[in-house]
Image (tube, grey):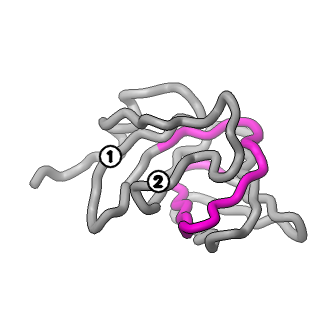
Amino acid sequence: MDKVNLAEKFSLFSEYWSPKIAGELNGQHVKLAKFKGEFVWHKHDHEDEMFFIVDGTLKIEFRDKTVTLHKNEFLIVPKGVEHRPVAENEVLVMLFEPATTLNTGDTENELTKHQLDRI
């Protein structure tokens, strides 16, 4: 059992939209990611997804509205709900989701990560 220092973990990588596994519990991954720019529209048919903002501001676009998240806020996107994260500036994000969750959900493209690095 080792404690995790988020600042140390975020300093280990610089690429955007490439989640890293920082921990596991009960079949869930705790992932850290840096976001900047627009991601792809996607949904997760079988998994809920939780976005916790460690630093910065993230907009989560839905087809009918946009939710803006700031530092120390989180949002759970229910399974089956189409969404698109958008970050005007760099955002540090912690994600909680089942280990089976693919970062681009039902959309396969150059941002899809089938294997995630552990940090």
| Image quarter of the N terminus | bottom left
Residue 88 spot, x, y in % from top left: 76, 41
CA gap, disc 1 and disc 2: 9 Å
Against 19, residue 56 (above or below) is: below
The disc label shown at residue 118, or none: none
What's the residue at 41%, 37% (across, down)? 116
Residue 52 spot, x, y in % from top left: 52, 61
The disc label shown at residue 22, or none: 1
Q: Residue flagged by tag 2: what amino acid is it?
A: Met
Look at the image and say whether residue 28 sits in the magenta stretch. Answer: no
| Image quarter of the C terminus | top left
Residue lying farthest left?
1
What's the residue at 43%, 35% (across, down)? 115
Q: Seen in the image, is 59 located left or right of residue 105? A: right
- Region of the chain picked out in magenta, as a range: 33-57
Against 100, residue 46 (above or below) is: below
Q: How many marks?
A: 2
Residue 24, by quadrant, is: bottom left
Q: Are marks 1 and 2 in contact (CB under 8 Å)?
A: yes
Q: Residue flagged by tag 1: what amino acid is it?
A: Ala
Q: Which residue is mark 2?
A: 94
Q: Which element is circle 1 on? A: strand
